[in-house]
Amino acid sequence: MTFRYIGIDDNENKEVINNFSILIGHLERLKGVFKKMKKKYYFVILFLVLAIFLSGCSGGGIVTPANDEAKIENVLQEYFLSISEQNWSKAKNCCVYGSQRYYATCTMESLINNMYQLYSVITITCYMDNVSVSIYGDFADASFHITMYATANYYYDNQSGYMIYYLQKIGNNWKIYDNL
């Protein structure tokens, strides 16, 4: 696969691709490790991977019209609601096809589906608040606070923190493409 990001020079693009390739390699190795672990540890590590996928940092920005800001907040709410409902096709539809966020969602779907081999009931609940949006033409970033709860049978874990997601306007819709 080849990835190229608009507005990133070749050296930064190579670094992004290299980091993404390293992440995929680590995830492939984790699959083998998961098979050998006890069920409790498997769930804890999986949830930490989920938290890493959804992690980021916050930032500032420019004041923009409320219409696009509302659309951006709505797509983020829809994305996290889809994750909570485990409606993976709807969650992937909130992302730019082929983007890092799209593939991270595919990986999350695969990991959760693998967990169903060990657990009969898996729930994920995501709450997002304190959204701050900055729009730069057809690109935007949104920083927010998120709280995630996950259960698998009798195991329970939660994480919370501030994140930043990057979005791109495609046609009249905003889609998530990254969260670095």
Image (cartoon, rainbow, N blue to C red):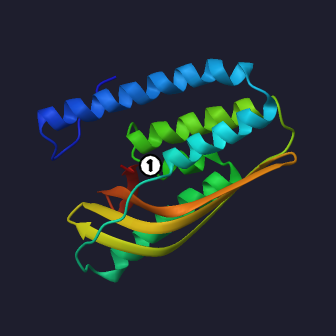
Q: Is the residue marked by circle 1 packed among few (<14), some (14-19), or many (20+) residues within 10 Å?
A: many
26 displayed left or right of 113: left
Front in this rendered view, residue 162 or 112: 162
Taking 8 as reference, is 115 left or right? right
On the image, which quarter does residue 40 sit in?
top right
Residue at 73% across / 19% down in the picture?
36
Q: In this view, does 86 lie to the left or right of 156?
A: left
Q: Name the residue under label 1.
A: 95
Residue 113 appears anywhere in the view: yes
Number of labels in the image equals: 1
Tell me: residue 156, above or below residue 18: below
Q: Where is residue 136 in the image (x, y as percent from the top left)?
A: 21, 66
Coordinates of residue 163 in the picture (x, y in percent) = 44, 60
In this orientation, which residue lies closer to the viewer: 93 or 158?
158
Q: Decide: is 53 above or below 125.
A: above
- Residue 32 x/y as whole percent: 63, 17
Q: Residue at x 79, y 28 (%)?
A: 38
Badge 1 marks a residue whose secondary structure is loop
> Given the image, on which type of amino acid does mark 1 rest?
Cys
Q: Where is residue 156 in the image (x, y as percent from the top left)?
A: 78, 52
Please say if 105 is above or below 31: below
User: Looking at the rendering, in which quadrant would you find the N terminus?
Assistant: top left
In this rendering, position of residue 143 left or right of residue 46? left
Which quarter of the picture shows residue 141? bottom left
Q: Which residue is drawn at 28% across and 81% down?
A: 65
Q: Residue at x 58, y 50 (%)?
A: 90
Q: Nearer the viewer, residue 93 or 61?
A: 61
Write down the quadrant of residue 174 in the picture.
Answer: bottom left
Camera-side residue: 36 or 86? Answer: 36
